[in-house]
Amino acid sequence: MSTLEHNNADTTSGGDTLVSVENLKKYFETAPGFLDRLFGDETSPVRAVDGVSFDVIRGETLGLVGESGCGKSTTGETVLRLQEPTDGSVTFNGEPVFELGGAALTEFRQRAQIVFQDPFSSLDPRQTIGATVRQPLDVHGRGTLDERNERVRNLLERVGLSADQFDRYPHEFSGGQRQRIGIARALALDPDFVVLDEPTSALDVSVQAQVLNLLDELQTEFGLTYLLISHDLSVIRQVCDRVAVMYLGEIVEMGPIEEIFTAPRHPYTEALLDSVPRPTTEEAQRDITVISGDVPSPRQPPSGCRFRTRCPHIIPPDEMDIDQQSYRAIQTIRQRIDDRAFTIPEDASVETTVEQLYDRTVDSPLPAVHRERLETAFESIAEGKWDAAADAMSAYTSICERSNPELDGDTHSAACHLD
């Protein structure tokens, strides 16, 4: 066996699971701003990843999907220990990644690699692509220089480039070609596990298909296991075996790819799927689940279910008879009270203020009991009593607000109280 080839003979010792992630957390501390220092407020960390758990089965492609900023890339980087975790554990082939050091950590670095999102910034413009792809071999001392150069030329050929391009620089290549260079670099040490961080997002659609087909071929040829991070559901469906849906630092649904796409169980997953353009006109009039509002801050995520501030199916209290549209509107009012986001007219009477706030926030008639509660809350706002206003609306507290649902561990599970 060549000194450049990695011996994979012992990779079955960990059973079917190659990578296991348990309660992974990654928080980013930030320096206090001017107002924080002025008022003596403590800053809250950014909870980029907040209790994520999943397994990656040997030989599969697990997709990690969600909106930009939900923590997908941070999850991938922390799993590879490119970011140091705040809490939790990751095991690779049965070995605890966060406890590795010395030769064991060096071994892990060889067996777990990453393809970065941006093929333009992930390559050193001062190095030839030959030197770039060879660098992992140089760092880990694989073979002689001639053997390393031969390995690089073979890899360039395998990813669809030419060995004659060995001495060219990154600026001489297109975006798709640069991503192929990044793939070749990731394969240089013959890894078992590769994190693909949005590998096609910066590429044209036609080039995306070529790169995805290449990744599929390489997975079969080299026995690779992938964690594919993407916000593009069409890419996820084409490539992945299973998918984990991520929202605001947490996984809210996980399951086989076809089950997720044909029978989603979480409102957020439904909304993501509805946002995908359809190629046929027959579905032009279909009902679409719309996500309202903005993504909450990861510094101060909502209590309970993190999606509740945008969910179209939030659960009213058991004893309350109210339609979903009215309840959603009342929950929005409660959030604005908590944020003290109402503007009180100057020099207006309490009665006028209540009337104006009601007209601005309520679009459809409400039963008397709900109207009276809102008017009581608006009276407190008019008098500057925000805590009293919040107390007046406490009857609308939902289980979605009190309790954070968890994945149940089934093959297809969703973290939702509706499930």
Image (cartoon, grey):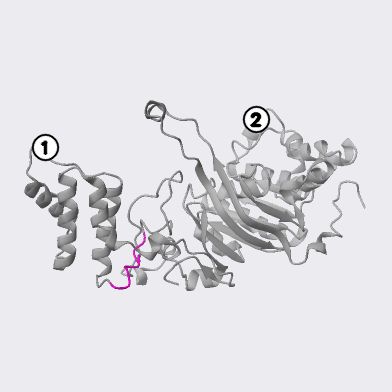
Q: Main secondary structure of the magenta part?
A: loop
Which of pointers 2 and 1 lies earlier in the amino acid sequence? 2
Q: In which quarter of the image is the C terminus?
A: bottom left
> Residue at left 55%, top 43%?
27
Q: In this view, does 419 lie above or below 212?
A: below
Return the residue at label 2: 125
What separation in Å lies between label 2 and label 1 (alpha carbons)?
Answer: 60 Å
Q: Which residue is drawn at 48% across and 73% down?
A: 262
Query: Measuring 61% from the left and 52% from the top, which residue is drawn there?
Result: 24
Question: What residue is at 88 percent from the left and 36 percent from the top?
Answer: 145
Boundaries of the magenta span: 311-319
Q: Where is residue 367 in the image (x, y as percent from the top left)?
A: 16, 68
Q: Nearer the viewer, residue 62 or 350?
A: 350
The kind of residue on which mark 2 rests is: Pro
Q: Disc 1 residue type?
A: Glu
Q: Mark 1 points at which residue?
A: 346
